[in-house]
Image (spheres, helix red, strand yellow):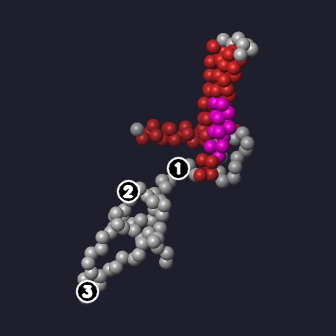
Amino acid sequence: MAAPSTPRGFGGSDAEGEPPKATSKPGSAKQAPQKQPLQPSKPTSHQQAPRPRSAIPDHVANRMVRRIALLSGGPTLLAMGVFVLSYLLVSQGTMRIEPIVTITVSGVFFVLGLFGLSYAVLSASWEHAPGSLLGLEQFGKNLQRVRTSLGTMKGRS
């Protein structure tokens, strides 16, 4: 039987590299107490902190991240690019652009990024098999799940 790789309580560990502790048996000569090395407060390389269990499975989280990067990251980069492009055009005297136009166009892209973030999270498939490219059918299912969950939470209050 293999020894567990996680530390046990406050009394030291069976970590790799440590010799087994000498135990005294009844009737044997009493040994001098051995000093235990101080345990570090942070987990070392062989002592990993337990990973908390997530409510979202890893394969679903990975799909959400890919969709967020595309549907939210793209419009957000475009919004910032509008400021840079506007600055370059105005500073070089190529074009006269009113500040309200720059702010409005970049604001539209920021709002698109916000909607993209929401859509990316709600359109990801929770099944093991990946969903469609746009995720339209998953969006309806996941939106209904959110509504049900919110209704349940209101009922508990």
Identify the element where label 2 is drawn.
loop
Task: Tell me if residue 117 is in the magenta stretch.
Answer: no
Q: Amino acid at mark 1?
A: Ala
Q: Percent from the top left, x then y, of residue 144? A: 59, 39
Label 1: how many Cα within 10 Å (few below 14, some 14–19, many 20+): few
Identify the element where label 1 is drawn.
loop
Identify the element where label 3 is drawn.
loop
Residue 141 visible: no
* Residue marked by disc 2: 41
* Residue marked by disc 1: 55
Instruction: Locate the C terminus and report the quarter of the image it occupies.
Output: top left
Say which of 70 and 128 sits in front. 70
Q: Establish if 13 lies above or below 101.
A: below
Q: Establish if 97 lies above or below 120.
A: above
- Label 1 to label 2: alpha-carbon separation: 28 Å
Say which of 116 and 131 sits in front. 116
